[in-house]
Amino acid sequence: MAVKVNTFRLLANLEGETFVLHPVGELDLSSHWRISHWLAGYLRDGPAPATLVDLADVAFIDSVGLGSLLHVTSRLRAGGHAVVFAAPRSQPAKLLLRTGLTRHLGVYGTAAEALRAVGPARPAREDGRAERHAPRS
């Protein structure tokens, strides 16, 4: 019998004034609470002017995970903040396309394209490298 181990993680970095959220793993019923917990803290601490959700390392999204992405989008946009998504692959890309959400969510093929869409990217550090770390809770 195979046992599924959820190894979902949230990584984050700052690219200029754009906060980049980088989920890794499967965005589903077992991981949606991590997105909700992150969003509550992010809203409490004052979000960046723009947020990019980089889906490059998300292997699967179910209906609960899709609801999490829609919730993030609606809460941030309601506060006047830009939100874009980038680089969905395989099943997540098909799901977003079939549901018609690629246009509504602002989905771009690469993170670089998404960053250009929300404004000029300025390095977060003097050496020009962005730090990737776990987001605040």
Image (cartoon, helix red, strand yellow):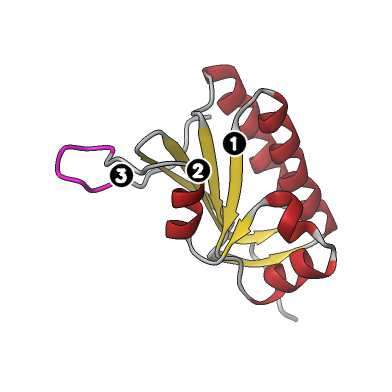
Q: Which residues are magenta?
A: 124-130
Q: Residues within 10 Å of mark 1 (few under 14, many from 20)?
A: some
Question: Which residue is nearer to you in this view: 112 or 91?
Answer: 112
Asked if labels 2 and 3 touch by Cβ distance under 8 angstroms, the answer is: no
- Identify residue for label 3: 131
- Quarter of the picture containing the N terminus is bottom right
* Residue at 64% in and 64% down: 5
**Which element is circle 1 on?**
strand
* Residue at 52% in and 35% down: 50
* Residue at 53% in and 65% down: 56
Q: CA distance from mark 1 to mark 3?
A: 21 Å
Reply above or below: 1 against 62.
below
- Identify residue for label 2: 118
Q: Position of residue 134 (x, y in %)?
A: 44, 42
Asked if labels 1 and 2 touch by Cβ distance under 8 angstroms, the answer is: yes
- Identify residue for label 1: 82
The earlier-in-sequence mark between 1 and 3 is 1
